[in-house]
Each structure stands twice: as C-alpha cells, then as structure tokens.
Image (tube, grey):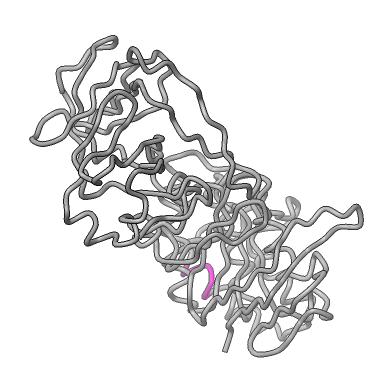
Amino acid sequence: MSEIILRDVSKTYDNGYQAIHQIDLTVREGEFMVVVGPSGCGKSTLLRMVAGLETVSDGEISIGGEVVNDFTPGERDLAMVFQNYALYPHMTVEKNIAYSLRLRKLSGQEIQRRVTEAAEILSLTDYLKQRPGRLSGGQRQRVAMGRAIVREPKAFLMDEPLSNLDAKLRVQMRSEILQIQRRVGVATLYVTHDQVEAMTMGDRVTVLRAGVLQQVDTAQTLYDRPHNVFVASFVGSPSMNLLYATLNGDGTRLQVGSQSLAVSAETFVRRPTLRAYVGREVIVGIRPEDLTLEGAGETLVGRIGHIEALGSELIVHFGLDARNYVVEDKGGSAEEVEELLEETALTQHVRNVARVAPRSSVTTGDAVPFHVSMERAHFFDLSTGESIW
C-alpha cells in the first residue's frame, strides 16, 4: 500500500507568503501523477512537503496509510530523483547506486542483488565500474534512477528530472522512466513545468496555479474539458486562442471584433448553461488545430504575422481585429490582462495561432480566412474564468 494522500494541505512561510493553498490530492498505488504549472506556482514546494524537506503549515500528508507530518525525510521511506542527479563523482556507478543500501547496513549479498537487478532494468550493467563523469547526461540520470529503485521505497518523488537533458534525450528518457515506474509499480509524484511532458507521461495530471489546485484529471480530459480558462490556456501546445466575444440577442451568432460566427443549436445542447449568456460578453477559446485554411462553414479573417515551418505542419501566427484575453501565469485573480485593439482593421498585434497542413499556400502579410470548427469551441465566463457547460 503506497498511496500518497494530501488532505487540506497548506504552506505559509514566516513572512506571511502562502505558497500552497488547501490542496487535496491522492496519488494512488502504482499511479504516475504529474504536477504541472508555470514557474513559481508551488510545484516543488508541494513535492518537498511530501518528502519532509518543508514543513506543513496546515492539513496532513499520509503515505501508505500513515500520517507523516512529523516524520523526518528518512522515516518516510521515499526515493527522490532531482534534476541535477546528485551523484558522487569519486564513486563508481555501482557504488553510487549502492550507497543508500550500505548506509542501511544491508548484507553484501542483498546489496549486490539489488544493484544487479537495477542495472539490468536501466541498461547500466556495462557501466557499473565507471565513474559518473564519463557518462552521458541520460546515463547519469539512469544512475540516479537506479539509486532510487534499489531502495525499494514506498513511493518515488521526481523534481524536474529531465530538465538538464537535450530535447531528443528528454523524449527518450520520458519513455524509459515510465517503463521503469511500471515495473516497480509504486506511487510516483513527478513535477515538471513542461506541459507536453506532463501530458505524455501522467496517468493523471495535476495543474497548479499560484499554489491553488486548478484541476486533476487525465491528459485528454484536461484538453477536452478544462475547468477554467487557465487550464485551457496552459494545456495544449501551441496554446488555445482566447478572444473576447459576445453572443447576440437570439444566440445564433457570436460577435468577435467586427466579424461573427454562427452558433448552432447543438452548441446549446452540449453546453446548456451557455443559454444564460445570450446577449452577454464571454471568452471564446479556439485551439490552433481547430483553425484550418480549407473546409466549409464559418471563417475568421486574420492577417498573417509569421509562419513556422516544422515539416509535418505549419504554425501560422496571425492577428485579428478583436481583443485577446491573455492569461497571466501567476495569481489566482479572475481579472486577466487584456489588449485593447482597434476594431477597424486587422491588428498587427499577433496573438493568435493556427496549426495547418504543410506546404499550404500562405504568405506573411496576407489576410486569410481561417475556417473555425465551432463544434469544438470553448466558452468561459468573463468574470470567473470558469468553463461554461
């Protein structure tokens, strides 16, 4: 039994700054839980409280069914993997992996068994006699993982373990860490600022903002049904386009700047509370992949600012004669930054993004009609930022 349970957990520092606000969270046995959010949102603080490296101001943390608030880090029986590896450079790989076992005075035979098994899992058998300085970044991260595995802990805690690796190696190591965790089968709490990493690794993903838990769900649910405009903007790359818009008097059209989009009856069936917003201003969210250059139906004309050619797709950045709703990374206020733009011409302030087919005929400076998949549009309350369903 290795569940990690946080009940109403808060962290307030001596200067009065509250880093974590009343978080309830359960990491199930064998689950890979990712905590994601912008820099300074409290991710590492949360992890350190679970580890016992930070005290809990309010609430309680239990591991394996036992409340551990007053336990030292060593008494919690957790293994932690850091972004800087924290290896001893003068020791061989074998001795680095075995170090914690020797401190616990396990028998030489047991230590050898665990080290050999971990080395096989991590493909480190041929490197056991080498020192960390001779290994690649990915190999050093595997050694750090090996040191965690051999302890046979109740749970793993990982604090941005891949941030020091190059992009290609990060992708490879994501897969390897998941395979290792599946084999070991213990609860894992994994912190990252990289939402792509979070989406591809987590059984479930916890989104934090300014120490406040925003949503805990599968990656697909976060993407399809975000609870609020912050989650909607944070999850997905490139980010969701967010615009101020007004539902007209009968709810059949959505005014976006000087342009408008048809709103079908099915939209109100899928989102019944949207009917209460007829005649009111809302935030409309459109994901980049729901804007295409070819198709039928409603369009928004935008002026292309610049184009990123990625081979498999084009990322087209464009401006509209409408106000963008801009979500700040920090702070829990519903009042966000807004850009006041003239609505008489297409703005040169490029805030919107479309993901389109490669080799599409588009040129910087062109005014182009983008077809909008309105059935996949998102709507948010302007005053609270909450999703409208």
Q: Is residue 297 left or right of residue 219?
A: left
Q: Point out the image quarter for the N terminus.
A: bottom right
Q: Is residue 262 left or right of residue 81?
A: left
Residue drawn where x is 57% and y is 45% of the image: 163
Q: Which one is in front, 318 or 276?
A: 276
In the picture shown, does residue 32 fall above or below 36?
Answer: below
Q: Is residue 304 left or right of residue 188?
A: left
Q: Quadrant of residue 367?
A: top left
Q: Is residue 372 left or right of residue 274?
A: left
- Which residue is farthest left? 296
Relative image position of residue 203 (x, y in whole percent): 42, 68
Q: Which one is in front, 123 or 264?
A: 264
| Count of marks, rendered view | 0
Relative image position of residue 44 (x, y in whole percent): 68, 56
In the picture shown, does residue 153 fall above or below 238?
Answer: below
Residue drawn where x is 33% and y is 12% of the image: 345
In the picture shown, does residue 278 fall above or below 62?
Answer: above
Q: Quadrant of residue 328?
A: top right
Relative image position of residue 82 (x, y in whole percent): 66, 56
- Which residue is farthest front? 249
Q: What secondary structure characterizes most of the magenta part?
A: helix
Residue drawn where x is 70% and y is 55% of the image: 87
- Which residue is farthest right? 14
Based on the picture, tell me whether residue 308 belongs to the magenta stretch.
no
Q: Quadrant of residue 313?
A: top left
Range shown magenta: 117-121
Residue drawn where x is 20% and y is 44% of the image: 252
Q: Which one is in front, 96 or 368?
A: 368
Relative image position of residue 74 (x, y in whole percent): 79, 76
Q: Point out the image quarter for the C terminus.
A: bottom left
